[in-house]
């Protein structure tokens, strides 16, 4: 038994109570973080997290773990920079080793317009607190000597932005650090407990129906990732969310240290090295919305081709594992956080391909909303009502997978 498991075993897993002040549906990073911050920041512990499978079994345990703040609109830069900073201290705060490693992310441009976009990104990042600079091809080579600046003779690297504080952290450790932190303070986390319906009185959600019986609640928060449209429909809400599969894969161990995270604006792929030395790669979502968890050869071939164009050394590696998650994509590529038109029913969704980095900030802000009843200023722009108000937070270029 290792040190990590030893710290887990002292937990008891009580049966669900009949009633809680707050019920959070979904034991991924966002649900667990909200529970953690409710307990640690607000002393609210009569809280249950209901997870139909196991903690971190959704996207929060399937992602490529990139944490960065180089977004394209002020509200997003401020939010993701705050999340990045919460990650920097999460290990010390929770006392759990989440394997946080600062690496920096290079975002390559291959055309004049791409270069202008990266210059604009660097400028807007710096204006709102994120440490992003614009690099020339020669400067890029100093950060990442493995890059073929000719881009295989087709995609020349003409510059790029560099978000120096970008990082990675081990995803399942993040989930468990938050779960443990919440449980230690009295929060109940119920695995293998599916929410099958919402209890309503008029326009108010008063609890949830589960496969273990009904549970009443003062507030119900949805944090169910790609399954949000089904849950919201139980409250009569139609959300502007489409669920798309997203795939990733890792290679065998690369003997040398590959320090930065590398992404490309035009080639639409990203690469980093895991703590085990594997090269971890991802690209864009599958175009067809579905709940399909199958991985396919087309994705592998196309992503590998693009990655090897810029990083030829990858050709010598072998693919070890490939997997898929299903992502809750919003029309403007920004998250949706806050109250809904149904009383007592809050949502955190639209995390798409970019929600791992947001876990601490979303959890902290949603906890503040639940505790105070007031929407915090930082997440107010991301309200669901923005779609009805025709006030989109368009940030597609920052998704990294589009
Ligand atoms: C391949 C891939 C790579 C990614 N890479 C990155 C990255 O590098 N950086 C980044 O920032 N983001 C990345 N993401 C996105 C990120 O993983 C997600 O946005 C984030 O994990 C969403 O967390 P969540 O808690 O909202 O959802 P999830 O982690 O999916 O958790 C939702 C949970 O709800 C549970 N649930 C669903 N329905 C019910 C129900 N009815 N009752 C009870 N429980 C229910 C599910 O079982 C699940 O465990 C990636 C995603 C994928 C798939």
Image (spheres, rainbow, N blue to C red):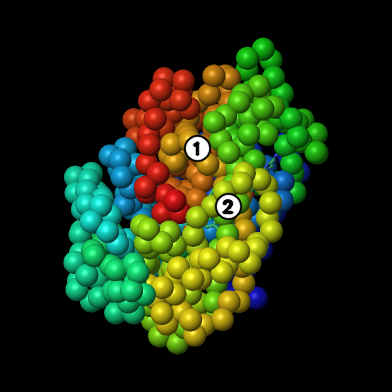
Q: Secondary structure at mark 2?
A: loop
Please give left or right for residue 178 compared with residue 291 in the image. left
Name the residue furthest right.
212
Q: Where does label 2 land, which residue?
A: 286
Q: Residue at x 52, y 82 (%)?
A: 317
Q: Position of residue 134 (x, y in %)?
A: 20, 59
261 lies above or below 312 = above
Looking at the picture, tell me which residue is in the foreground, 288 or 390. Answer: 288
Looking at the picture, tell me which residue is in the foreground, 200 or 253. Answer: 253
Looking at the picture, tell me which residue is in the foreground, 254 or 302. Answer: 302
Q: Where does label 1 land, which residue?
A: 330
Q: Is residue 145 visible?
A: yes
Please give left or right for residue 309 compared with residue 39 in the image. left
Please give left or right for residue 116 compared with residue 175 in the image. left
Label 2 residue near ligand 1, CB within 8 Å? no
Q: Residues within 10 Å of mark 1 (few under 14, many from 20)?
A: many
Name the residue furthest front.
154
Q: Position of residue 319 (x, y in %)?
A: 58, 77
Q: Secondary structure at mark 1?
A: loop
Q: Is residue 38 visible?
A: no
């Amino acid at each position: 038994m290792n040190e990590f498991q030893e710290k887990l075993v002292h937990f008891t897993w009580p049966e669900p109570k009949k009633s809680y002040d707050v019920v959070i549906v979904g034991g991924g990073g966002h649900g667990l973080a909200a529970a953690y911050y409710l307990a640690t920041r607000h002393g609210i512990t009569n809280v249950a997290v209901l997870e139909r499978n196991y903690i971190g079994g959704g996207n929060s345990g399937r992602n490529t773990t990139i944490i960065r703040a180089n977004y394209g609109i002020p509200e997003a830069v401020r939010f993701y920079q705050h999340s990045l900073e919460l990650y920097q201290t999460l290990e010390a705060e929770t006392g759990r080793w989440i394997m946080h490693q600062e690496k920096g992310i290079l975002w390559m441009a291959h055309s004049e317009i791409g270069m202008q976009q990266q210059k604009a990104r660097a400028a807007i990042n710096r204006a709102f607190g994120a440490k992003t600079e614009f690099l020339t091809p020669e400067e890029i080579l100093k950060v990442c000597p493995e890059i073929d600046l000719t881009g295989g003779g087709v995609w020349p690297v003409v510059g790029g932005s560099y978000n120096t504080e970008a990082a990675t952290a081990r995803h399942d450790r993040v989930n468990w650090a938050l779960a443990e932190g919440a449980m230690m303070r009295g929060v109940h986390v119920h695995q293998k407990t599916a929410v099958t319906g919402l209890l309503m009185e008029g326009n108010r959600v008063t609890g949830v129906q589960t496969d273990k019986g009904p549970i009443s609640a003062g507030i119900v928060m949805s944090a169910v990732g790609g399954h949000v449209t089904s849950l919201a429909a139980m409250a009569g809400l139609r959300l502007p969310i489409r669920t798309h599969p997203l795939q990733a894969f890792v290679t065998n161990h690369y003997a040398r240290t590959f320090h930065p995270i590398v992404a490309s604006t035009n080639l639409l792929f990203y690469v980093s090295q895991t703590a085990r030395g594997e090269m971890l790669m991802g690209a864009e979502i599958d175009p067809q919305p579905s709940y399909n968890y199958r991985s396919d050869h087309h994705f592998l071939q196309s992503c590998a081709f693009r990655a090897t164009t810029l990083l030829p050394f990858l050709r010598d590696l072998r693919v070890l594992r490939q997997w898929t998650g299903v992502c809750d994509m919003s029309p403007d590529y920004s998250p949706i956080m806050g109250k809904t038109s149904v009383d007592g029913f809050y949502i955190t969704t639209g995390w798409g391909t970019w929600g791992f980095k947001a876990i601490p900030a979303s959890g902290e802000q949603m906890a503040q909303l639940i505790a105070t009843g007031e929407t915090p200023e930082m997440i107010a722009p991301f309200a669901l009502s923005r779609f009805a108000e025709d006030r989109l937070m368009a940030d597609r270029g920052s998704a990294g997978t589009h």
